[in-house]
Image (cartoon, rainbow, N blue to C red):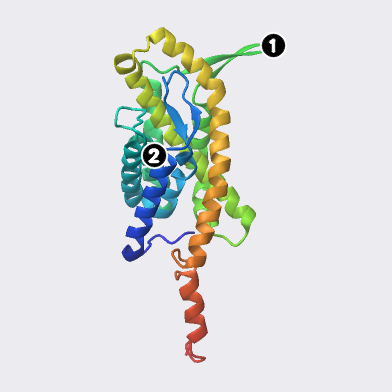
Amino acid sequence: MIAAEISRRRLVPLAATFAATYGVLRSVPISVMILGSGRVLTSSEFVAPLLGIILGPYAGSLAAVVGTFLGIALTGRMNFFGLDFLPVMVNALVLGFLMRKRWLFSALLYSALLALFFLHPLTLHFISVPLPNGAVELPFVWLHIVAWLLLLSPLSRKSVEWISGQTVSKAAGAVFLLALIGTTAQHLTGTLLFASLAVPLMGITPQTLTAGWVAVFYVYPVERLIIVLAATVVNIAVVRALKVTGFLRTADGITTREGRSARKHRPNNASQ
């Protein structure tokens, strides 16, 4: 797995770099939000999982907050009236706790989000999907439930170990699974924010909101999977680059560059 701790000397500049990158990418829109009145999703979604995977829950959350407000300062655009940092911060917390082997915290946070969704009075809990043999009722958050089950399974903890493995296919699979968990947690938080703010602050009627949920149901799985695929490519590239430059430790607990140096200068009788 990626080292549980990056030295504080390296963590601060790394967190600042990620925050700046996230903030700048918030100025690059990739799609519009249904019923969002000009609100957009941005390419910052592709790097969001990195905040938790690399920086951990606390530094990752701080980078999420700083990066979000930097993006707001650069664009003047907000989706949730200044609470825009909450979705990406949840992404960083869920993945950060998981990467630090605090699986229970990740599971409890994700479970709480799902419970809040089904308790919220303005979310649409089930969608009637027409099929040739009749309609079937599906949970609106079916993809989030899949991600939640993956988080609860041993696969999530295995992915923490596989992400820095030497096999590219195994590392890519691990990043894909982690990015799916993180981005669905982020989307779930954004959905709860939208449901809470749409009627009182955005002027959307409950009837229009219900119709919007139906449209979102058919769009968000495709949108989230595209984001996860792009995030997988970005995260694999960044993780490997950080390992090569010595910012991340390898499995033996030393950085790649430092490890080569130590092995080069190790005396022959070091094991005696």
Indicate whether 200 appears above or below 82: above
- Name the residue at 48% across, 79% down: 261
Between residues 40 and 164, which one lies in front from this camera angle? 40
The image quarter containing residue 108 is top left
Could you say where residue 266 lies in the image, as x and y percent from the top left?
Answer: 48, 86
Could you say where residue 79 lies in the image, as x and y percent from the top left?
Answer: 37, 28
Residue at numbered disc 1: 133
- Quote the CA–CA distance across marks 1 and 2: 40 Å
**In-image side of 206 versus 272 (left or right):** left
Q: Which marked residue is nearer to the observer: mark 1 or mark 2?
A: 2
- Which element is circle 1 on? loop
- Numbered label attached to residue 244: none
Indicate whether 221 appears above or below 250: above
- Which element is circle 2 on? helix
Indicate whether 230 appears above or below 196: below
Indicate whether 202 appears above or below 41: above
Could you say where residue 214 lies in the image, as x and y percent from the top left?
Answer: 51, 15
Residue at numbered disc 2: 88
